[in-house]
Structures are given as C-alpha cells and as structure tokens.
C-alpha cells in the first residue's frame, strides 16, 4: 500500500524528533529504576572506598539534575532498539534515516561530544553518525500500528568489556557461569562497576552478543520470562557480588547492580555465551510513537 | 584510611610519599588533562610537551567543550576515561617529565606499581561516569595546547575541591587493584568448586 507522501514525511519527522529528544534525555536523566538500584547499593555497601564511590555517584546524579548536565561525559555510541508494528505507516528504511538524522541533530544542537570515527583511519565521521552508525536493533510486532523506540547511548568504557566464548555443549550451564564470573572479575574496575551484566546465551556467535546487548537494555532487575533462565539470573547476580570487585573495582560488596540474560535456542553442537557490560550510568530512554505521529515519552520501559 | 587535601603541582615529594593506598584525597590548584593521542605524540612521535609537567597531576580525559568567539574554551561536560590503555607511559612521565600523580578511572594494571614506587608517583582513582560533578569542580579551562588533537589536547584546568579521589596505587608498592584482584581470584576458585 502506498502512503500519502505528506503523511510519511510528517511521520519521519516525528521519529527524527523522538530520536533527537531520546538521545539527550537518556544522557541527562537516568531512569527511576536505576536511581533506586544505586540507592539500594549505597545503603548496602560496607567497604570504605566502595561507599565513597557510591556516595559520589549519588552526588553526581543530583548535580546532573540540578545543572541539567550530562550524567557522564561519554555520549557513547548511539544504539536504538526499534520495535516496529506491522501496520506502522513508515518503512524501516525511513525509520533508520530518521534515527540517523535525529542523532546528528541532537549532537549539533546541544552540542554533544562526537565520538564517531572511521574504524581504520580513526578520523571523525560526523556528529555521532557514520557508516552503519547509529546502531539499531530491530524487532517487529504483529497486530500493532505503533513504533516503540528506545535509545541506549553506550559508553566505550563498558563496551570495551565485552566477551564471547563458544563453549562446548559438555561445558553445560556450569561453563556459562564460570565464563560470566571470569569475565567480570577480569574486567575489574574498567567498565565502571556496579552496573548491569548482560548475558546472551544460545543462538550463534553474533546473535549471542546481540542478545547480551538486548539484555542490558531492559529495566533493571526485570527477569527473563523463562523461569529456568530467570533462576540463572538470580544465581549469577549473587555469585558476581561474592567476587568482591566492588564499586569502581576498589573492593566491596556491590560488584554488579543486576544480571540480565537473553537466550535463543541453538544448534545441538553449539553453546555460545556472550557478556556485554553496562556501566552504572546505564542510560536509557524510550518513546511510543503512534501511527498518527503522536509521541509518548516514557523511560520506565 | 586518612583524608588529605593536596595542591598541585606539588614541590615537596613528601606530599606524595605520605599517601597510602585507600586514602581519600581532595585536590586544589592546577591539573593537566591528557589522553591516548596526547601521550602517543610525546612518547611515540618524540614531540616535547609545550608545558612544564614537574610535580604535575595528570587527568585521563577528553572534555566536552564549547569554543567561544574569543578563542577560549568553555566547559560543557568534563569526565574521565579508562586509564589502563595508557599504563605504558607511566615510567616516561615520571622519569623524563617529573609527573607525580596520574588520575583516571578503572585503575592501572600491576606494571605501574614498580615505576610509581621508584619515581615517587601515585595513581588516583576517580569515579568514572561522575562527570556532572567533576565539571562543577573544574573552575576554568586556562589553557589548551595541541588543539589539533581535539579533544585529546593538553588541557590546563584550575580546580577547586576536586574529588573525592581514592589513592589506588601509592608510592610504596601498594595497589588496591592488585589486592582486590588477588582476593577475587582466590574467591573464584571457591565459587567454581560450588557450581
């Protein structure tokens, strides 16, 4: 079905507006679920350097609110999650164009530090956009005419602490647990703990890592709908906090705020596990965009 | 674990030697912002830095700034990057230029312990990501050198009550990172046995 050109163009502008707003909003105003988790961590931590770190994080969030400044200077790599309803009247190719334009506009207008470079020459490629930037995770929904859009600006300090291992099936769940534990201990203070450990299991090598990224995009403490996976999330959370790495790797009780797992069924010969770390400044902002271009901002999802 | 206030650049070595891993430090005076490309230029390309680094406090940063019409820079958001990438410059910064303190996030690996002990240097841990607060503690960007490396220039900041920082590695061979990692490796053995 061909859309009337004016409607499609208006809708594309709405998506661009939403992207520009979400990028800046995510960088400045962290979601309530994260504030609660950090507050809980601050009351739970007993080590002196660990408490000092969590107190400073608390002060920092308040200063970001009062000064209307960015929580963290790393404006990240712009990552979006787009869940497109089958009846949403704008093609994903145009949605992508709108996300790119919105990211660039926010970067120029604020202004935001631009981090995008060519991966070989290291030359800047534009206002946080470039070849295949921003990055979009796509999902499609039946019986819907809406677009659910989420922006997760991903800082490099935590993204650098990403790990993949193709375990043997015989390594089992024990192998998965060991790999997650050794990854987080090895990362130490570098990914700005305490944050969210995203784990992707199953699928293929590339899909496991994409699932790990999807896992860090979830509101903190949510659980996988599959009870077996949810149980593993709880167990890993407790195990990770026994390692003593602590806030900013200075030692303490709170090494991670939570552990989220996304999974996919896999080949009988495969047992992939991927870890993607999200720092304590787990920035995230969302919007629902209607078929008529209405935008409902909501960072609780 | 004591609390200290230090003014940089330091002229008295004892100001550094009195610090112990785990102590809290608040910094006044002037600090110098550097990053990967700044140090690659100094050490790999052999270009002398155009300012005196004796007694200096170096911060691992790539600031977000706004350029004003008169050519000066105004702060937008200034935070700290991961230090571990830049550990190989530690010895040279101390022995060739007299740097006394390096501040960043996430810590230095063990290879920094010996040069810091030998040269009377310390590593200060800042809270990564706490840039909104850090920005308020930087009073002014006084100088920007090597502007062509933007944002990885040499930055001279005047600071007030910068911190709180934690002494991560002291000048006596102690490293919190080493200790935390050693304990965690022991703990992992115990956890694996339970799985």
Image (tube, grey):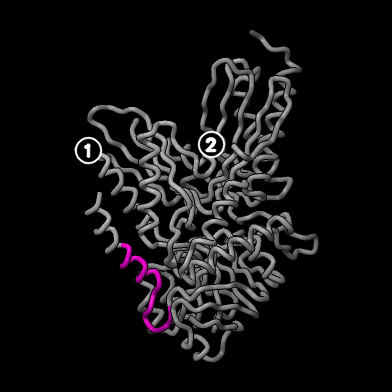
- Along the line of sight, which residue is nearer the eye, A104 or A181? A181
Disc 1 to disc 2: CB gap under 8 Å = no
The answer to whether residue A198 of the structure is visible from this angle is: yes
* Mark 1 and mark 2 on one chain: yes
Circle on res. A135: 2
Circle on res. A297: none
Tell me if A53 is positioned left or right of B185 in this view: right
Secondary element under disc 2, as helix, strand or loop, is strand
A192 vs B174: above or below: above
The answer to whether residue B85 of the structure is visible from this angle is: no
Residue B171 among magenta residues = yes
Q: Give residue A56's position: percent from left, percent from top.
A: 59, 65
- Along the line of sight, which residue is nearer the eye, A177 or A200? A177
Tell me if A169 is positioned left or right of B23 in this view: left
- Along the line of sight, which residue is nearer the eye, A189 or B49? A189
The image quadrant that residue A80 belongs to is top right
Circle on res. A168: 1
Secondary element under disc 1, as helix, strand or loop, is loop
Q: Residue at x 53, y 77 (%)?
A: B24
Taking the view exactly as shown, the residue that stands out farthest to the right is B69
């Amino acid at each position: 079905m061909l859309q009337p050109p004016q409607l499609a163009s208006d809708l594309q502008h709405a998506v661009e507006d939403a992207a520009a707003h979400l990028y800046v909003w995510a960088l400045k105003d962290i979601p309530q679920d994260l504030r609660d988790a950090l507050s809980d961590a601050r009351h739970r931590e007993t080590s002196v350097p660990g408490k000092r770190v969590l107190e400073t994080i608390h002060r920092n969030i308040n200063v970001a609110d009062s000064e209307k400044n960015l929580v963290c200077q790393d404006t990240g790599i712009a990552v979006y999650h787009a869940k497109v309803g089958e009846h949403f009247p704008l093609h994903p190719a145009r949605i992508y164009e709108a996300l790119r334009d919105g990211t660039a506009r926010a970067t120029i207008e604020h202004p935001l530090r631009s981090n995008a470079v060519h991966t070989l020459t290291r030359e800047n490629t534009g206002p946080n956009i470039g070849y295949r930037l921003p990055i979009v995770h796509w999902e499609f929904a039946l019986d819907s005419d809406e677009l659910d859009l989420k922006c997760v600006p991903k800082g490099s300090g935590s993204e650098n602490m990403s790990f993949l291992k193709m375990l043997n099936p015989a390594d089992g769940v024990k192998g998965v647990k060991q790999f997650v534990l050794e990854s987080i201990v090895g990362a130490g203070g570098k990914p700005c703990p305490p944050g969210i450990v995203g784990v992707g299991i199953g699928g293929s090598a590339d899909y496991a890592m994409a699932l790990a990224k999807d896992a860090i995009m979830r509101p903190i403490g949510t659980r996988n709908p599959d009870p077996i996976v949810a149980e593993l999330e709880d167990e890993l959370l407790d195990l990770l906090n026994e390692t003593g790495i602590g806030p900013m790797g200075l030692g303490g009780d709170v090494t991670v705020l939570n552990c989220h797992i996304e999974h996919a069924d896999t080949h009988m010969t495969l047992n992939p596990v991927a870890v993607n770390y999200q720092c304590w400044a787990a920035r995230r902002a969302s919007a629902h965009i209607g078929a008529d271009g209405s935008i409902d901002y909501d960072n609780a999802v | 674990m004591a609390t200290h206030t230090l003014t940089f650049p330091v002229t008295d070595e004892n100001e550094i030697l009195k610090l112990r891993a785990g102590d809290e430090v608040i910094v006044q005076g002037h600090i110098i912002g550097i990053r990967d490309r700044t140090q690659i230029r100094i050490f790999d390309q052999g270009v002398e830095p155009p300012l005196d680094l004796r007694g200096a406090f170096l911060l691992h940063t790539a600031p977000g700034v706004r350029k004003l019409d008169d050519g000066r820079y105004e702060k937008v958001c200034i935070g700290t990057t991961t230090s571990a990438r830049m550990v190989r410059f530690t010895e040279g910064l101390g022995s060739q230029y007299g740097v006394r303190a390096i501040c960043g996030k996430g810590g230095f690996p063990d290879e920094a312990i010996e040069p810091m002990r030998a040269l009377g240097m310390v590593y200060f841990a800042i809270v990564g990501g706490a840039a909104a607060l850090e920005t308020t503690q930087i009073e002014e960007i006084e100088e920007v050198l090597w502007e062509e490396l933007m944002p990885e220039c040499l930055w001279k900041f005047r600071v007030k009550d910068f911190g709180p920082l934690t002494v991560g590695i002291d000048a006596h061979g102690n490293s919190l990172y080493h200790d935390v990692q050693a304990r965690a490796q022991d703990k992992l053995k115990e956890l694996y046995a339970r799985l």
